[in-house]
Image (cartoon, rainbow, N blue to C red):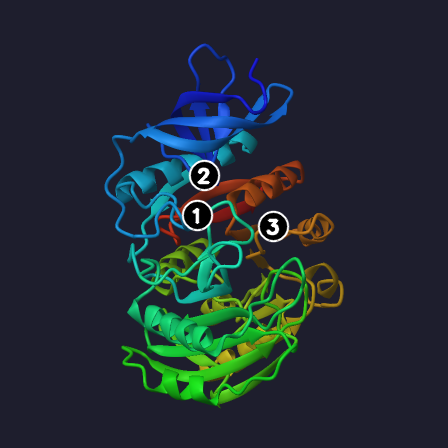
């Protein structure tokens, strides 16, 4: 039996979703779960949790690299908590993620289904169209930092210029804001004391149009003119073009971006992106897939799974800015979208008008409640819920519609697997599924599932 606090050495057998390394130790029957490892590595770790015969360890050192590894391309690799699989060959990443998704589904699916494997991202680097940077320090009482959280740290921040997930425009904007605020000597918001001014920097850039939207998030504890920073941003040599610079206020104690009030410093509070021949207006806080080119791959699968929608009513629940709804609307009788973020609903309505679609209706509110207020009944359901999946109380309501076909888009396969168990109990079964690697280098994977009603 292993003891908490003791150090062991073992070999990583595999990595289960999302980041659970299964490590085998000689002489021990039960494996240990260790995060931030790669299959084939020999690692040392200390036991941090022991629950019955289940052990979890904290990685101490990689003693021997995996045969799957290469030299990391990013200088922040291992310090930043982002691209844990960056050193793996991309084809090996795809194989690993495909096996992770299939294992999750196989554990709950008791009938035959077709697994169509995993689709690669068109771009492996520079693929993100949105980054949320945090102000802080790299160590206690250190100089101002602006970037991403250090691995396994709630407090320390890495100024991650040169990040491979985004293109150079993000670095230029990041460095501009970081240097300006460092010169100004403004304090960042401390998570413990809840004192300070600077909180986050949100940058969004459209791949197809080159539009860039910048949003500085602060508390209301100080007043500071952003005119000089605005001039510096305007003077940057960028491949894209800044359509708007915003200032959002957030006094919430939670370490998350929350919009309590937004002012436009210059420009406008939206930008445009294009997907599969449609144009979309995107606002700072509305949901939109963070990998634009990968989204085209994802939505192409969704469109094929939806199938024939002629003369049918389609419900797109958790619809965001209405991307999937509008793809379906081109050939459907009518599409109803439901989204809890009011800003996204407004954008969805404008997007439908922008694309000349008059058979779309978008409703604001929680899916759990709004579906009780809709008099229409759907012929097809499209579900694209947040990471936690569908609310347990909403699932029976969706099943009660009795539609023959459901297309479920999941950004967290474990949530899909959990919800599939409920679908199975109610006569709905998985016909086929495909994974899409929307986030190369990271532990995340998107999955599209076609669910049919039997009997």
Residue under the point 49% across and 47% down:
449
Q: Sequence-wise, which precedes: disc 2 or disc 1?
A: 2
Q: Quick one: quadrant of the C terminus? A: top right
Name the residue tied to disc 1: 445
Which class describes the residues within 10 Å of circle 3: few (<14), some (14-19), or many (20+)?
many
Residue located at (54% from left, 78% from top): 347
Q: Residue furthest top?
A: 27
Q: How far apart are the two marked residues, 1 and 3, measured between alpha carbons? A: 14 Å
Q: Secondary structure at mark 2?
A: helix
Of labels 3 and 2, earlier in sequence is 2
Q: Is residue 127 above or below residue 52?
A: below
Percent x, y for residue 87?
A: 29, 42
| In contact (CB < 8 Å): disc 1 and disc 3 | no
Give 323 or 401, whichever is nearer the viewer: 323
Q: Which quadrant: the N terminus?
A: top right
Crowd around label 1: few <14 · some 14–19 · many ≥20 (10 Å): many
Towards the viewer: 52 or 190: 190
- Badge number at residue 101: 2
How far is the residue under mark 3 from the one under mark 2?
A: 16 Å
Q: Quadrant of residue 169?
A: bottom left
- Tell me residue 175's x, y (percent): 37, 71
Cα separation, mark 2 vs mark 1, equals 8 Å
Question: For numbered disc 1, what is the local secondary structure?
Answer: loop
Q: Position of residue 78 (x, y in %)?
A: 37, 45
Q: Which quadrant of the structure image shows residue 39?
A: top left
Residue indicated by mark 3? 389
Q: Residue at x 38, y 65 (%)?
A: 292
- Asked if labels 1 and 2 touch by Cβ distance under 8 angstroms, the answer is yes
């Amino acid at each position: 039996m292993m003891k908490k606090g003791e150090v062991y050495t073992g070999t990583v057998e595999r990595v289960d979703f999302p980041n659970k390394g299964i490590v085998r130790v000689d002489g021990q029957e039960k494996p240990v779960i260790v995060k931030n490892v790669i299959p084939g590595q020999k690692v040392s770790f200390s036991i941090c949790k022991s629950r019955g015969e289940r052990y979890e360890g904290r990685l101490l050192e990689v003693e021997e690299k995996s045969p799957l590894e290469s030299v990391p391309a990013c200088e922040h690799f291992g310090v930043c908590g982002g691209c844990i699989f960056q050193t793996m060959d991309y084809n090996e990443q795809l194989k690993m993620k495909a096996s992770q998704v299939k294992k999750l589904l196989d554990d709950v699916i008791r009938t035959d289904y077709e697994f169509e494997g995993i689709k690669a991202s068109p771009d492996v680097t520079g693929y993100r169209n949105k980054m949320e940077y945090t102000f802080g320090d790299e160590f206690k009482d250190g100089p101002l930092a602006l970037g991403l959280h250090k691995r396994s740290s709630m407090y320390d921040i890495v100024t991650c210029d040169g990040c491979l997930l985004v293109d150079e425009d993000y670095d230029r904007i990041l460095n501009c804001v970081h240097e300006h605020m460092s010169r100004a000597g403004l304090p960042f918001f401390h998570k413990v004391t809840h004192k300070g001014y600077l909180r986050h920097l949100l940058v969004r850039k459209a791949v197809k149009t080159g539009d860039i939207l910048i949003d500085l998030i602060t508390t209301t504890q100080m007043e500071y003119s952003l005119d000089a920073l605005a001039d510096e941003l305007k003077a940057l040599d960028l491949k894209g073009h800044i359509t708007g610079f915003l200032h959002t206020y957030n006094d919430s104690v939670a370490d998350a971006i929350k919009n309590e009030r937004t002012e436009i410093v210059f420009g406008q509070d939206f930008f445009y992106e294009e997907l599969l021949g449609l144009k979309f207006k995107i606002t700072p806080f509305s949901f939109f897939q963070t990998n634009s080119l990968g989204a085209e791959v994802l939505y192409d699968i969704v469109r094929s799974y939806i199938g024939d929608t002629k003369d049918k009513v389609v419900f797109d629940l958790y619809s965001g800015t209405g991307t999937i709804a509008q793809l379906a609307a081109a050939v459907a009788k009518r599409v109803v979208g439901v989204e809890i973020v009011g800003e996204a609903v407004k954008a969805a309505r404008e997007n439908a008008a922008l694309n000349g679609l008059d058979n779309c209706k978008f409703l604001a509110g929680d899916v759990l409640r709004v579906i009780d207020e809709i008099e229409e009944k759907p012929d097809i359901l499209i579900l694209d819920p947040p990471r936690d999946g569908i609310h347990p109380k909403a699932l029976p309501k969706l099943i009660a519609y009795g539609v023959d076909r459901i297309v479920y888009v999941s950004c967290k396969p474990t949530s899909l697997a959990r919800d599939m168990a409920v679908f199975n109990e109610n006569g709905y079964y998985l016909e086929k599924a495909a994974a899409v690697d929307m986030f190369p280098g990271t532990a995340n994977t998107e999955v599209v599932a076609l669910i049919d009603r039997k009997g």
